Image (tube, helix red, strand yellow):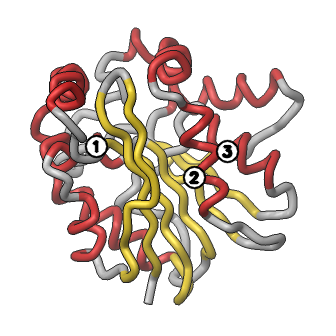
Amino acid sequence: MKGMSRPGQRYIPALRYDWLTPLYDPILRWTLRESAFKRRLVEQARIEPGHRVLDLGCGTATLTLLLRQAHPRAQVARLDGDPKVLAIARAKAARVGVTLALLRAMAFELPFTDCSLDRVLSSLLFHHLTRENKLRALREVLRVLRPGGDLHLADWGKPQDCWMRAAFLLVQSLDGFGTTVDNARGLLPHLIREAGFSGVRESSRYKTMFGSLSLYQAQKP
């Protein structure tokens, strides 16, 4: 899922070009230690039976399927703004005998009532959003979480060294410097706090071929 800087602006896919969308899964699998960091994201969320969970920017449903496997008694909603990536998600789920209900919507206009969710998980969404839309999306997440509910987020963090900084330039050239600069500066935790969350912390960090990937967690007061 890739956000728009203004309502009505042209929607841009996660890899910037529609023709690259079918390569999304192989690229993540081969270059980002995807299985490791997404399993860790699921573990840190401490989901319980009956919890209402949102996979925000679900993409091709890799995280959704991990959630389903680890927590079959949780109620998981899946949302993304890209119809082509949602079609890939449906096909991927069908190959393992799973039928998924997928919602098409933007992260900053969530179709959920106030205080209706226990957990929100998001993987590699926020570096696609402008700062304005990062904050809009985070405030929407805050709105739909119940008090005491958690946000668990995986995205690019501040590069750990000069090699990680150089590697991240490729991501920035593809996804845009304007939307990724906050990630490169390590500002996601500050934006999460600005949106109104408490207990914000970086829980894990991974070196990848394209830069430093961080896991964050935060709570609605």
Q: Residue at x 36, y 79 (%)?
A: 197
Q: Is residue 100 above or below residue 47?
A: above
Q: Residue furthest front?
A: 161
Image location (x, y in percent) of residue 16: 29, 22
Quadrant housing the N terminus: top left
Q: Which residue is mark 3?
A: 64
Residue 162: which quarter of the image?
top left
Name the N-terminal-most of marks 2 and 1: 2
Q: How many marks?
A: 3
Viewed as shown, does residue 170 lie left or right of 56? left
- Can residue 194 be seen in this snapshot? yes
Q: Is residue 75 above or below residue 169?
A: below
Q: Secondary structure at mark 2?
A: helix
Q: Which residue is mark 2?
A: 41
Residue 48: which quarter of the image?
bottom right
Residue 128: which quarter of the image?
top left
Callout 3–callout 2 Cβ contact below 8 Å: no
Residue type highlighted by circle 3: Thr
Viewed as shown, does residue 164 lie left or right of 123? left
Residue type highlighted by circle 1: His
Image location (x, y in percent) of residue 190: 21, 68
Residue type highlighted by circle 2: Leu
Badge 2 density bin: few <14, some 14–19, many ≥20, Cα 10 Å: many
Name the N-terminal-most of marks 3 and 2: 2
